[in-house]
Amino acid sequence: MNNFYERWADFFSDALNSQVPELGNSEKLAYFGIGGSGIPGEVLKLLPLPVPYEVFRGYKVKVDEKTTVFVVSYSGNTTETLVALKEAERQGVRKLVIITSGGKMLEYAKAKGYPFLILPGGLQTRYVFPYIFTYLIKLINNTLGVGYKERELLEGVTESQAKVKEIATGLASKIKGKIPVFYASDLLPIAERFKQEVNENAKYPAFFSQLPEANHNEIELYSENYPFQFQPVVFPSDIIDEKTAELINAIIIRPLYSSPLKIISSMFLLAGFTSVKLAELMGLKPEELRLIPKIREITYKAFERELS
């Protein structure tokens, strides 16, 4: 079984040594991406940015000529993101950067003269998060001059890996045979990443939900006994998160650091190791995809005329 999360330190190190294009000043930022190429844009919301920032994870976008857009598609052939890119051009966007490993997106970037950053090919999108997110932080630093300490992404992985593996083994064992629901308030993108990783790597049901919203509806499901058992997992940020976890008897996963960049890299690493361990317990191959390639083909055919 290939565990590409074992290589994340090398991936972060390689990305840190990469050069990114200069985009100039930006009044607004937007991120286009979906699936494994979408969650890096979502987790960027955990960082305070000095300009308005929106994430569009689909083909419906709303931007204008003042918006700088990060367009991310690992394969370079993601239909929804290709459609979003063309729609952004129609809406007046002229400043953007494309992050991809190749495909139609790279061809389009070269034809239009757009700046681009190349991702290593031959992997699943979820495994190259270190490259995508490091590129984003570098671009943010260059564009907005905010000065995030990029190296903390690498440190969050190298310093935590032994502890992360230990936590992952225990968490996977507790999840197996139950349906995990990942809860968070401030750390919601991390809860979503855990859900995604369990779905893709372990082919296993998992869900995520936002606190405190879930306290006004969803937590009632824990008052009933079902033939299947839910396993709540909470990533707490405040006293309400803590009290919720206590009430519904949740597993609590606390960040290992106070630095936002270290939290992001170490918690995403934990999500990866947990899901791979669960796949191992289930006797499944994490890198194998069965239905996602089929829906990609169906989606492309639905938009084929617009993309031609």
Image (cartoon, rainbow, N blue to C red):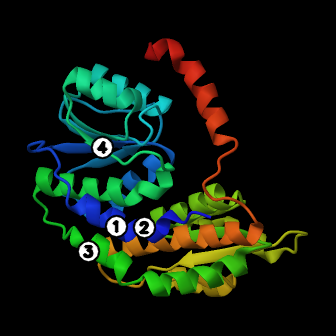
Q: For the residues marked 4 and 3, what is the alpha-carbon distance in whole angstroms?
A: 22 Å
Q: Nearer the viewer, residue 142 or 216?
A: 142
**What secondary structure is marked by label 2?**
helix
Mark 4 element type: strand
Q: What amino acid does circle 4 point to?
A: Ile
Helix, strand or loop for disc 1? helix
- Residue 49 in picture, x, y percent from top left: 22, 59
Q: Are marks 2 and 1 in contact (CB under 8 Å)?
A: yes
205 left or right, relative to 255: right
Res. 12 image quadrant: bottom left
Q: CA distance from mark 2 to mark 1?
A: 5 Å
What amino acid is at disc 2? Arg
Q: Which residue is mark 3?
A: 152
The label number, if any, that marks residue 10 in the structure image: 1
- Give the amino acid type for the residue marked by disc 3 in the picture: Glu
Tag of residue 118: 4
Dot placed on the residue nearer the N-terminal end, 1 or 3: 1
